Image (cartoon, rainbow, N blue to C red):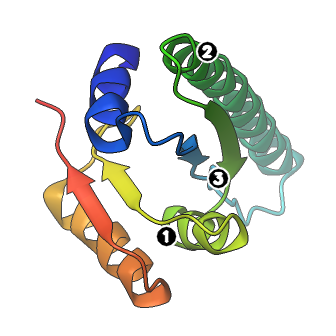
Amino acid sequence: SAGLAISNAKEIVGSSGTEVILFHVVSPENPLVMHDEHIGGVQAAADVYEAAQYDETKHVADQSETMQAAAEEISATGINATSQVVVGSAPAEIAKAAIDQSVDLVIISTHARRGVSRAFLGSVADEVMKELEVPVMVVRRS
């Protein structure tokens, strides 16, 4: 939530003037692939793919709006905050963004649209840590 993000940002950043980047990765949808010679199967596969694309586009738009609102709320407190939403593999995209933007600390949160298991969260953090030389903090939202 924006409130949680603001309190964490204030606590970690303080008044140092450090920039906060709110970063969200949307995992690409994996539409069902149907190997069916019948036209009905081909049409069904196309419909599934189109529905998955629509869901992904809507999710990106929703998350972009949410993250932008949170960044604006944080910025209103005097902390420089921006937001980004990308589609891809969470570990790869987080590591790439951290390197490209020369971040000093990565904080990975457990919040997600479909929920995140501890095992999955651990694997994301592990993969990110393998790629980066900066600290990686994992926080759990209760």
State the quadrant of the N terminus: top left
Front-lying residue, 51 or 103: 103
Under tag 3, what secondary structure? Answer: loop
Query: Outermost residue, right direction?
Result: 39
Mark 1 vs 3: CB contact within 8 A: no
Considering only vertical position in the picture, is 33 above or below 109? below
Q: In this view, does 46 lie to the left or right of 64?
A: right
Measured in 3D between alpha carbons, the distance from the residue under mark 2 to the one under mark 1, in whole angstroms, is 26 Å
Q: Is residue 88 left or right of residue 8?
A: right
Residue carrying label 1: 91
Amino acid type, residue under disc 1 in the picture: Pro
Under tag 1, what secondary structure? Answer: helix
**Callout 1 crowding tier (Cα within 10 Å): few <14, some 14–19, many ≥20:** some
Mark 3 vs 2: CB contact within 8 A: no
**Dot label at residue 28:** 3
Residue 33 % position (x, y): 68, 60
Considering only vertical position in the picture, is 130 above or below 35? below
Mark before the other along the chain sequence, 3 or 2? 3
Residue 109 % position (x, y): 31, 45
Q: In this view, does 72 lie to the left or right of 37?
A: left
Residue carrying label 2: 72
State the quadrant of the C terminus: top left
Mark 2 vs 1: CB contact within 8 A: no
Amino acid type, residue under disc 2 in the picture: Glu
**Callout 2 crowding tier (Cα within 10 Å): few <14, some 14–19, many ≥20:** some
